[in-house]
Image (cartoon, rainbow, N blue to C red):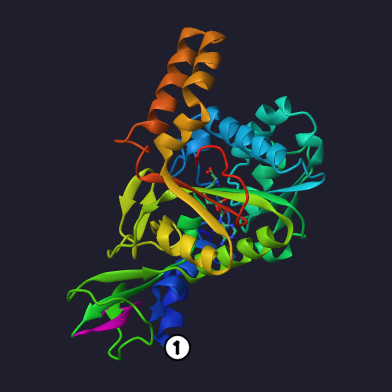
Amino acid sequence: MAGAAGTLSLLAELHARIGAEGPLTVAQYMEVALFHPRLGYYAARDPLGARGDFVTAPEISQVFGELIGLCCADYWRRIGAPDPVLLVELGPGRGTMLRDALRAARVAPGFCAAARLHLVERSPALRAAQERALAAPSPAWHDDIDTVPPGPMLLVANEFLDALPVRQFMRHAGAWRERRVGLDAGGGLSFVLDEAPAAIALPEAPEGAVREVCEGADHLARAIAARLLAAGGAALFVDYGYFPEAFGDTLQAVRRHRRHDVLTAPGEADLTAHVDFAAFAAAAAAAGARAWGPVPQGEFLAALGIEARAQKLIAGADPNQAMLVRSGCRRLVDPAEMGTLFKALALTPPGAPAPAGFA
Ligand code: SAH
């Protein structure tokens, strides 16, 4: 099981660990597959773009980041233009969204000068890409939100929550049991189910139903709510997921723009789960914040003025660029593409105004 450079493969490491500790929870498996320091999916690669594994909204069209930037600047003004204001992004990828956002937000006097950039990013490869994209505003990087300084904050996150590890539970013989990743007879990985019922309170469901629980999202919702209550601001999440709560196994692996088996070649494919927006909103509300939405991405971008923004770009573009603007925007809003599966959710302190797009 030697890898290309003579190093052990992640599969071999998982094998040894499961042999020693027993089957891993699905969340532990996701954590290792995505963030193992040497062999994890995010350790050494930039997975984004046509030549990578997947494409995200800011990489599809500059209009996405521009509208998010205008939305932030507008909200900043409506809450009294705090200076300084923390502009926080979770999982900025290549830094494209924030770069486009800051360029568009120059129309709001004072906003860019007031903004202090804080990027929450664990991937060294993507931190380097962000540094290239965002050189001028000199951001600070963090491994998680806990080290971001206190203060009024505008937080944005696109396709971040889907990367947070989920635990999975399956209804079997009248009880919920945790689903884990173990070893099969041939030395590969396979799903196994705990014999003992799980010590977790979940609603009744038919035999065979799967329920996902994202403890990382819960923790994050509470941490953000506490910051918003203490110092004001807003947080905006855009991601694919479901609302209301639902049962189902949504764990998926994607490699080179195609679905991939989730237990094959760990570390080589992106692993995500759909976001449970109701659970996320409930965790934030339990910590005192107000949740807005979720609103389908197509409706959200329409409310922010995607049509007018696209027309403005098209007016100054050559025919080829104009076609790219049109097709990119269509992909973002079309219900058959990203318009419905992707959703926007915002958090604010109670009593604060609605962010644009959530009226
Ligand atoms: N927002 C970007 C990238 C999305 S990919 C875009 O829309 O293009 C997910 C991003 O989140 C990557 O930058 C990844 O490295 C980062 N990420 C995933 N899980 C993380 C975690 N637990 N902590 C910090 N960053 C994380």
Residue 66 lies in quadrant: top right
Q: Is residue 88 left or right of residue 240?
A: right
Label 1, ligand 1: CB separation under 8 Å: no
Q: Where is residue 223 in the image (x, y as percent from the top left)?
A: 63, 66
The residue lying toward the viewer, choosing from 220 and 44, is 220
Residue at 31 percent across and 50 percent down: it is 259
Quadrant position of the N terminus in the picture: bottom left
The answer to if 291 sits in the magenta stretch is: no
Q: Is residue 240 above or below residue 282?
A: above
Q: Is the magenta stretch mostly helix, strand or loop?
A: strand
Q: Give the range drawn in magenta.
A: 174-184
Q: Position of residue 36 (x, y in %)?
A: 55, 67
Residue at 46 percent across and 8 percent down: it is 319
Q: How many marks?
A: 1
Q: In this view, does 140 lie to the left or right of 240?
A: right
Q: Is residue 345 above or below residue 165?
A: above
Residue 135 in sight from this viewpoint:
yes
Q: Where is residue 44 in the image (x, y as percent from the top left)?
A: 58, 54
The residue lying toward the viewer, choosing from 32 and 213, is 213
Q: Name the residue under label 1.
A: 20
Q: Is residue 287 above or below residue 318?
A: below
Residue 274 lies in quadrant: bottom left
Q: Position of residue 4 (x, y in %)?
A: 48, 58
Residue 186 in sight from this viewpoint:
no
Badge 1: few (under 14), some or many (20 or more) residues near its Cα, within 10 Å?
A: few
Residue at 61 percent across and 56 percent down: it is 123
Disc 1 is placed on an element classified as helix
The residue lying toward the viewer, choosing from 66 and 325, is 66
Q: Is residue 3 left or right of residue 89?
A: left
Residue at 65 percent across and 35 percent down: it is 74
Looking at numbered disc 1 in the image, what kind of residue is underneath it?
Ala
